[in-house]
Amino acid sequence: MATTGVMRPGHIQLRVLDLDESVAFYKDVLGLVETGRDAAGRVYFKAWDERDHNSVILRQADRAGVDLIGFKVKDKATLEQLDKDLQAYGVATERIPAGELLETGERVRFTIPTGHVMELYAEKTDVGNGQPYTNPDPWIAASEHGIAPHRFDHCLLYGPNLEENLKLFTEVLGFHLVERVLLEDGKSLLATFISCSHKAHDLAFVAHPEPGKLHHLSFLLDSWEKVLRAADIMSMNRVSIDIGPTRHGITRGSTIYAFDPSGNRFETFCGGYETYPDHAPITWTFDEVGAGIFYHDRKLNERFLTVVT
């Protein structure tokens, strides 16, 4: 797929209840690399194989959850055009100056129909992945520290107005619908899985009456063996596991869901399939949603459905 507009998820800013405890967790258990701290008290991380300066940003707060999610676009001209396109569509935008996030260029911020704050940006400092750009090795020591995912991959978000949300992402931002789950009426949307790339999803949304909720952020591992290793590390560190290791029907990924010390759910997964904009979306009916989410058990647990931050 030619990358012409929105390229990929770039960063997520999370609220945590105890910053020191959370920094230790994301660094030592998840195995992310700390890349900086700013005057606002935020702490910045990236996965070992990511090249941009940051992908996960933590800030102290009195309630857990997500502040914002940023997507990297191809270049500054694309950023300008998408800002105009959003405004023409009726979406209010705000310019956030370069440097407000460490090593990150100017951002275009807006709120989507599900109540989540999104950002687009074109520039973030390339700090590399610990390897040279000439004759690199396939991995480095940091790739064995903690769970050590390759990248921050996607998010599942809960909120209202899924139909309007889907139109915004597909008609303005260039995403395509990959999979969807229908409610009992066979028409209304319970969930959507959308992509701006060849991945099975870069974002997913589930219908929920409260806006702006985080179900989980997800990190990519490269094999089923690494998913099982992640389960071992979670157990060794007494991490609260929601479910897994198991497999999805939707997107076909192999997965574990667990909670950080503040109660923010995260996923470590591998697999999935490649998709392209000309592919017809896959539809799951309400009676098979259990198999869609957890293919082995073919049923959902109540905590997975109801716990969000």
Image (cartoon, rainbow, N blue to C red):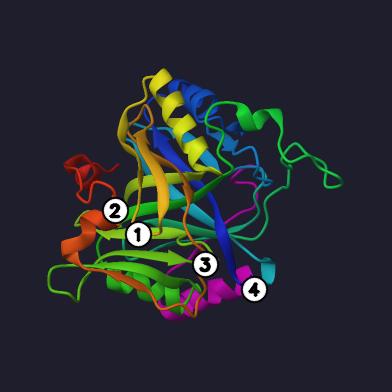
Q: Is residue 275 visible?
A: yes
Residue at numbered disc 1: 250
Question: What kind of residue is marked 3?
Answer: Cys
Which is in the foreground here, disc 3 or disc 2?
A: 2
Residue at numbered disc 2: 293
Residue 256 x %, y %? 38, 39
Question: What kind of residue is marked 4?
Answer: Ala
Q: Residues within 10 Å of mark 3 (few under 14, many from 20)?
A: many
Side of 296 relative to 52 (left or right): left
Residue situated in front as seen by the camera: 82 or 289: 289
Query: Magenta stretch?
Result: 78-102
| Mark 2 in CB contact with mark 1 (< 8 angstroms) | yes
**Where is 77 relative to 232, above or below?**
below
Q: Which numbered disc, 4 or 3, marks the residue that appears first in the sequence?
A: 4
**Where is 229 relative to 95, above or below?**
above
Residue 2's disc number: 4
Residue at numbered disc 3: 196
Instruction: Tell me the CA gap for discs 2 and 1.
Output: 6 Å
